[in-house]
Amino acid sequence: MSEGAEKTTNGTAKPEYKESTWGQVIWQRFRKHRLAVTGLVIITLLYGIAMLAPWVAPYDPTDIAPDRRLEKPTAAHPMGLDEVGRDVLSRVIWGARISMTIGFVAAGISLVVGVFLGAVAGYYGGTVDNVIMRVVDVLMSVPTFLLIIAIVAVVGPNITNVMIVIGLTYWSSYARVVRGTVLSLRSIDFVEAARASGNSSLRIILRHVLPNCFAPVIVMATLNVAGSILLETSLSFLGFGVQPPDPSWGNILTTGRQYMRHAPHIALFPGLAISITVLAFNLLGDGLRDALDPRLNA
Amino acid sequence: MKRSKWFVLVVAMVIVAMVSVGCGQQAAPPKTEPKPATPPAPPKVEAKYGGTFIVAQYSDITNLCPFLSTDGASNVVNTIIHRPLVQYRYNNVPTPVMAESWSFSPDGLTWTFKLRKGIKWHDGTEFTAEDVKFTYETILDPKTKSVRAADLAPVKKIETPDPYTVVLTTEKPYAAMIDKVGTLPIVCKHHVEKIGGLDNYNKNPLGTGPFKFKERVPEEKVVLTRFDDYFEGKPYLDEIVFKAIPEPSVRMMALDSGEAHWNWWAVPEEDIPRLKQDPKFTVLQTLRTDFHFFGLNCQKPFFKDVRVRQAFAYATDKVSIVKNLATYTGVVAHGPYSDAYGDYVNKNIMHFDYNLDTARKLLDGAGWKLNEKTGIREKDGKPFKVDCMVQQGDELRKNIGVLIQKSLKEIGVDLQVREREWSAELDALTKTRDNWDTVIVQFGASPDPDHYTIFHTKGGFDLDNYANPRVDELLDKGRSVLDPKQRKVYYDEYQKIAAEDVATIFLWHSIGVNLLNSRFKGMTNEPAGQAQIIHKVWDSQATGTK
Amino acid sequence: MTLGEFISRRLFVSIFLLLGVSVIVFGVIRLAPGDPVLVVAGLDSPPEVVESIRKEWGFDLPVYAQYFRWLVRAVRLDFGQSLMTREKVSEMIIARLPASIKLNLVAYALALAISIPMGIYSALKQYSLLDHLGTVVALVGVSMPGFWLGLILILYFALYLGWFPVFGVGTWKHYVLPSVALGASQAAGLMRMTRSSVLEAMNQDYIRTARAKGLAERVVIFKHMLKNASLPIVTIMGMRLAYLLSGSFIIETIFAWPGIGRLAINCLYSRDYFVVQGTVLLTAVMIVFANLIVDVTYCFLDPRIRYQ
């Protein structure tokens, strides 16, 4: 029996009443969503494998054996060999590393840039707001895919450029959401109070305004990682993604698609990997959305 | 007595029966016929008229005007709609088509082409020398912006003394006249004038070929129908439909499902052995006149020393590359001419057999010392790091790069494969010229041995920025002399020097692989393309007669 | 602000938007290395020919001059000619646009037909097995790389089973596989949105009122909830459709569908500048237009939101 327990008048213990933090409430609700939890587990697993790639991968992903090209899966090579005889399993594991890095970094860039610009636009209003929002509008009117390809054609397709370009494409949705939240909060009392007590604008934004944006932003970010991984796949389809011999799921899949008919193992496994990963992120995002949205309790 | 007679009679009848059954079995045509390399014998089974032939293209056509298009897809269609004076048929032999014969003057400056009479255009009017003159002049006109203008540039005068004779005059003897000019498809003068110029030609092409234009749905298909009055004889097929299927695996699947009948582009290597066994398909393999190569940019300081270039050549395992990556589609090359060039091939040039030790010694001799720690050679503090440019999305070249990278690593050279978009690569090779170190690419040369454009310092390509004054001289001479024996003397020396200089490490010559649905007969191996003999192709499931 | 004022104000802003888009695209593709004049003229061409081609297309002018030249003509709906095929850009686009639109509409309709009923069901029976199953299936659709799904569909349903043709256009059967591949990515988002809108509407006061009034469950659902739930669905629909058009390139390539996406990307590769500029402008116009329609419809459906 802990200290807070009280005894009722007839001697049985009253159930303990502890105040839960907001985080714990969210976690409770998230836990109920079994699919979302599955998503989280999968992501953690894949992330672990990806980070431990040098130790987990059975072979060197760049080791070629051209006389054994397109070998079907065997016990020694559970995912078979690719078109120059490299072990597909090792390449998929290393590819996990590169693809997930691209996903996280690109989403991170979008988040940072978008939240910052959105907050600035919402908080300062006026011309600043106008300019930023016009840029957002233009960006949303451009056929994004075409623009990405064109930019990558100019700057050259390597991992860094791909991450930055994808990152700079998606920030507009964050900006809109954050700006909306900031606008609605600007006139609320506690912000006025904070300002009156002399806090700098930056502190106000960071401490009071941003935490309220947390919910939609985190959901967006999760789905953004998924989207970035898929976008890299599409870029690889056109040859603008990560360049071989560096393995990314996108470029293994792209090379493999030529052999779909008679050596489908090359395309099958990275495709599955992408699908499962993106699915996991989507489930996670779905679950977070449900957990964080107070209105969705039936 | 009678019984023995009966016995003999029965035995005789049995023998006769057996023999006739055996003969009957022999008379049945074999399931697959070997492909002739010479003009095809007339079909053993009578060819039927009728049928629709569906061709799988790798992309939509760009231009139906034969001298404005540059891509393979358009060229196939245009070669069928239009005909030239001469074509290289039946193993690269210049064959008179719309021309009946040709000759050149003793000083080599005047060529006379006698044209066939009675050739009809698709609109029923007659083909004359006026059309030839019109075509050539249009190509030469800068307003047309034709790619083939450079081919006609040496021709200074075009005359038509009578409706069936064309006389071309040049300032210097132009050895490649037949190859570059004779093969230009001819367009119809009064038709182009009627439709108001070439801008509208894409919707309305007109030629003298075996099939005429029926309709085009952009991005989807082009449909041609038989031209009954074709001058080489009524073609067998009713219609030819060209469908654009960009995705390679889907193209193959279309042939599998029977939704397309002919795939002449990029038949996957690994499928070839299986396809050859499959009675549903006929696989045609033709040696081409091109070459795949690993080029070393001679403008770069690395490659200014011939020892370095030779070291690279010794470190390139051509045999293994071809065996593994071009098993059915390549023949190891040691020089720019494949055997399809016949007598012009010089068999006595330097070969570079794979030998890493020789390579290492050469690099040592050139002053590149191996740094034990990094494993990479250095000279004056600079490490030997080079990049290798390949076309973006090109699996084959990339894989070659990977193999070469591995060998070079063993002799202390760090090679990185960099993919570049086709436009950027073309730009780098022909305009900018100094933003690449090595390249792996293919060059499609034409049947005439004149390689002026390819390796002359003033030629349009000047591959690898190769500059050798003696080679320049030889190429100049070779193209201005008409006697094949004299040309061979010059070209033999050119091949010898180019091999020793090895700015270009020749990898292999392509064997063009065509996949045809076995239902269609009559297609032969044609190094210059099967479109030329499409009028001989017939559908065994057709039932029509003439 | 009246509706008229709202629309004219938005149109005015849209013009600047389109200008901005055209400038960006113009700049970016000119920056990319590669010279289309060389490709068209051929590498052997004498320099005079190359220069005359360059002049005729205006590539010898400074970049901003080229842009204005294009802009002035674009206003008169003259988007220039393709450098490769010499055809008029407007004609090329018009020839291919219907195919893309048809495919996208069918794909979207398919996605709607599946996801809206599923979304409603999921909302009513939240956390049931079918809800979870539906969510997973929809999310699988959005998680698979489009071309991978497309190739797998062709391999099994067209080649092995022979139910559908492998590629191209022609009959209704040709629509099925590419629509599924294209629509799969939409189904998840639509289902999720339907579900959350219905859920949200379910908890509103007026629903409780309607229930209290004793109206049949069915009536309650269909009349009130859907009307309010349709608001966000319509909102997203228009925008999605416009984006879909520009993103269907991959499916068009795999299935050999003669659409506009393929044209745009192929011309980007070959630096066929005018075609790319024309296509991008067209797509931007469609997106902007779609946004406008969506906003106006939004206002009609929900009287509370008036022209903000």
Image: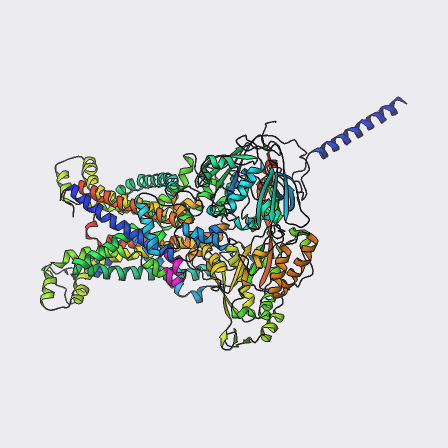
- Considering the whole magenta stretch, tell me its main secondary structure: helix
Residue drawn where x is 32% and y is 46% of the image: C74
Locate residue C40 relative to residue B95 in the image: left or right. left
Q: Position of residue A279 (x, y in %)?
A: 35, 52
Q: Quadrant of the N terminus of chain C?
A: top left
| Front residue (pair A68, B276) | B276
Q: Position of residue C171 (x, y in %)?
A: 42, 34
Tell me the quarter of the picture where residue A32 sits.
Answer: bottom left
| Front residue (pair B407, A79) | B407
Residue drawn where x is 59% and y is 44% of the image: B183
Locate residue B369 relative to residue B103 in the image: left or right. left
Q: Is residue B215 above or below residue C68?
A: above
Q: Is residue B422 above or below residue B29?
A: below
| Front residue (pair B155, C114) | B155
Residue B114 inside the magenta-drawn segment: no
Q: Is residue C114 above or below residue C19?
A: above
| Front residue (pair C182, C93) | C93
Q: Which residues are magenta?
A: A150-162
